[in-house]
């Protein structure tokens, strides 16, 4: 009997040792602490340079911070343009057919940051908690489209992997962290804390964007990062992609105006319509398409008065929106002849 128990003890000891060895071997190797010095990008500060401070683009500011860690010359406005939707127009009825309309750029959702980064030549890597359903199917398809990888986890976030990525010199983007409940960049860690960079520090009542916070339960939100081994889209192909949206957007814009004239109410009017035209004008000027640059600059000027209109009193400005959007539609229809020269 003693021999039997001794054998069992030896077997259990060997199994425990083997398990510990395999755990140690499979566990990523990274230093106890690591911290980068990311270049801070604020969507509010960046857009203020061009006439009006526009918020709501912290996901693009976070993306710009991640990409600047590879290439400091990448600018926020260009990340915006490389989404491919800067000259688009769309609207929807958030409260059903009898509700009011929300006007915005086409595909104006946070997953489009993957398109921007992918078009700039970066491969996305995404980690998603299974409990987070939302629009995750779009994140998954976008990531795969650009040759990236997506993994979902059930309980604990893969903090070892995150630390290993950070320690390799690649920052993380997240839709929320213990440091801030909106998009921010994670630039490092130590045993107890995460080091984050907040796009707009005033959102957390701070002046400086760098912040530290207890790791707590970890990065339990959506997490993404990029590797610089993708295929950058050519400027010509990006312009052709933009061209493919123009005719459809003009038709949608016409229907939007028609609905307003027939009495539909306004729920929201996105400031990104103004901002997209401004950045598109800058891009076309850089690419030597002077007519398109001037045309979208004119749209910027026509949309700027509407960029100051916010809920809840936005519907009082319905007449002004109709008037300005008719001018924008006429202006952008006049640009079709220049688009038709591009093939």
Image (cartoon, rainbow, N blue to C red):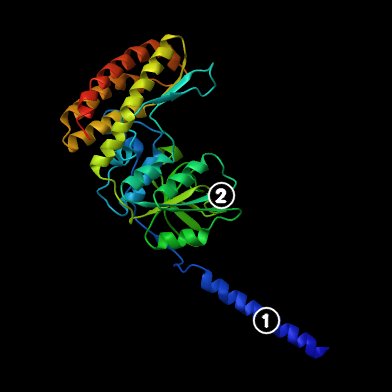
The residue lying furthest to the bottom in this view is 3
Q: Give above or below for 224 relative to 86.
A: below
Q: Secondary structure at mark 1?
A: helix
CB under 8 Å between discs 2 and 1: no
> Helix, strand, or loop for circle 2?
strand
Tell me if 98 is positioned left or right of 86 in this view: right
Q: Residue at x 79, y 87 (%)?
A: 4
> Is disc 1 surrounded by few (<14), some (14 to 19) or many (20+) residues within 10 Å?
few
Q: Quadrant of the C terminus?
A: top left
Which residue is depicted at the point 30% across and 54% down?
70
Q: Residue at x 17, y 27 (%)?
A: 291
Q: How many marks?
A: 2
Q: Which residue is mark 1?
A: 13
Task: Report how far apart the C-alphas of labels 2 and 1 lie in the structure.
Answer: 35 Å
To which residue does mark 2 refer?
129
The spot of residue 76 in percent (x, y) is 30, 41
| Coordinates of residue 38 in the picture (x, y in percent) | 34, 52
Q: Picture coordinates of residue 168 (x, y %)?
A: 39, 63
Residue drawn 65% across and 77% down?
16
Task: Pick the quarter of the image with the N terminus.
Answer: bottom right
Q: Nearer the viewer, residue 207 or 129?
A: 129
Neighbourhood count class around disc 2 (C-alpha, 10 Å): few under 14, some 14–19, many 20 upward: many
Which of the marked residues, 2 or 1, is nearer the chain's N terminus? 1
């Amino acid at each position: 009997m003693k021999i039997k128990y001794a054998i069992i003890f030896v077997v259990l000891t060997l199994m425990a040792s083997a398990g510990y060895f395999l755990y140690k071997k499979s566990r990523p190797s990274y230093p106890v602490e690591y911290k980068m010095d990311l270049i801070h990008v604020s969507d509010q500060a960046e857009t203020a340079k061009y006439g009006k401070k526009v918020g709501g683009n912290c996901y693009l500011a976070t993306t710009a911070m991640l990409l600047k860690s590879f290439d400091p010359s990448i600018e926020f406005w260009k990340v915006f343009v490389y989404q491919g939707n800067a000259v688009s127009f769309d609207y929807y009825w958030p409260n059903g057919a009898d509700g009011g309309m929300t006007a915005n750029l086409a595909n104006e959702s946070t997953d489009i940051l993957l398109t921007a980064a992918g078009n700039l030549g970066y491969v996305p890597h995404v980690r998603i908690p299974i409990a987070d359903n939302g629009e995750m199917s779009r994140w998954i398809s976008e990531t795969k489209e650009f040759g990236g990888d997506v993994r979902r986890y059930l309980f604990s976030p893969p903090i070892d992997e995150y630390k290993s990525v950070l320690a390799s010199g690649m920052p993380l983007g997240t839709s929320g962290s213990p440091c801030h409940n909106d998009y921010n960049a994670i630039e490092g860690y130590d045993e107890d804390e995460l080091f984050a960079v907040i796009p707009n520090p005033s959102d957390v009542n701070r002046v400086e964007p760098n912040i530290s916070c207890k790791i707590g339960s970890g990065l339990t939100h959506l997490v993404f990062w990029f590797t610089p081994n993708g295929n950058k889209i050519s400027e010509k192909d990006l312009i052709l992609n933009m061209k493919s949206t123009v005719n459809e957007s003009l038709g949608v814009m016409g229907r939007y105006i028609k609905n307003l004239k027939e009495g539909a109410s306004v729920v929201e009017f996105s400031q990104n319509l103004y901002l997209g035209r401004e950045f598109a004008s800058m891009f076309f000027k850089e690419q030597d398409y002077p007519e398109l640059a001037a045309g979208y600059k004119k749209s910027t000027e026509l949309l700027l008065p509407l960029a100051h209109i916010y809920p809840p009193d936005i519907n009082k400005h319905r007449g002004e929106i109709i008037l300005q959007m008719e001018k924008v539609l006429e202006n952008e229809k006049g640009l079709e002849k220049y688009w038709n020269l591009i093939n």
